Amino acid sequence: MSDTEQPSAQTTTPTPPAGKTRVTKRGGGDPGSRGRTTIADGVVEKIAGMAARDVVGVHAMGSGLSRTFGAVRDRVPGGSGAKSVTRGVKAEVGEVQTALDLEIVVDYGVSIADTTRDVRENVITAVERMTGLEVVEVNIAVTDVKLPDDEDEEPESRLQ
């Protein structure tokens, strides 16, 4: 081959020796893009619940009734502690998008508008980063305000 000639774009695979089989490589492209990944609603709910709880000013998640039942369930031997992470979170997950509904209790004295904005930002960032799903909306219902002199709904002594 001279310096000006280009190698042929066409390549041939040699015939395998007798008794051997030829391995044909199937499928092309990036191996990471072959197949489908599905993400369960519960996975997105856990991520969103953890992200919402990380925001300063969020006292608890869920309505008063769900928190009370959850506190009892969490203390029962064999009860699901993982359920408390998703308390107050509902996700609808599609193939490429998700929508979330959150119920939160805020601490008295915080700006509800600022707190809910921070919750939205934190939840969207966490869910999109971890799942690759587009978060189309995060609806937040503020169900209560935790006053400084209020008892927590889940005192240790009463539920044991």
Image (cartoon, helix red, strand yellow):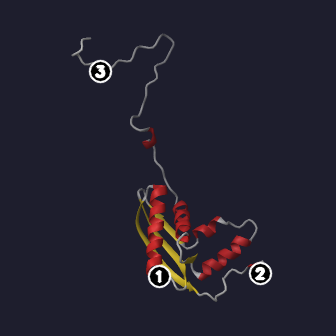
Lower sequence index among marks 2 and 1: 1
Q: Please state which of residues 106 and 148 is positioned toward the viewer in this rendering.
A: 148
Lower sequence index among marks 2 and 3: 3
Residue picked out by circle 3: 10
Q: Can you give x and y, in whole percent of width and height, for residue 100 in the image?
A: 46, 69
Disc 1 crowd rating (10 Å Cα; few below 14, some 14-19, many 20+) is: some
**What amino acid is labelled 3 in the image?**
Gln
Foreground mark, 2 or 3?
Answer: 2
Which quarter of the rendering shows the N terminus?
top left
Disc 2 crowd rating (10 Å Cα; few below 14, some 14-19, many 20+) is: few
Q: Residue at x 48, y 79 (%)?
A: 141
Q: Residue at x 54, y 81 (%)?
A: 106
What's the CA distance linking mark 2 and mark 3?
A: 79 Å
Is the residue 152 above or below the residue 51 in the image?
Answer: below
Q: Residue at x 43, y 74 (%)?
A: 117
Q: Which mark is residue 112?
A: 1
Looking at the image, do the residues carrying marks 1 and 3 touch, with CB atoms under 8 Å apart?
Answer: no
Disc 1 secondary structure class: helix
Q: Residue at x 61, y 78 (%)?
A: 66
**What amino acid is labelled 1 in the image?**
Ile
Q: Is residue 89 left or right of residue 121?
A: right
Q: Can you give x and y, in whole percent of width and height, for residue 132 in the image?
A: 44, 55
Q: Which mark is residue 157?
A: 2
Q: Can you give x and y, in whole percent of width and height, for residue 45 in the image?
A: 53, 65
Disc 3 crowd rating (10 Å Cα; few below 14, some 14-19, many 20+) is: few
Is the residue 31 above or below the residue 121 in the image?
Answer: above
Q: Please state which of residues 55 and 152 is positioned toward the viewer in this rendering.
A: 55
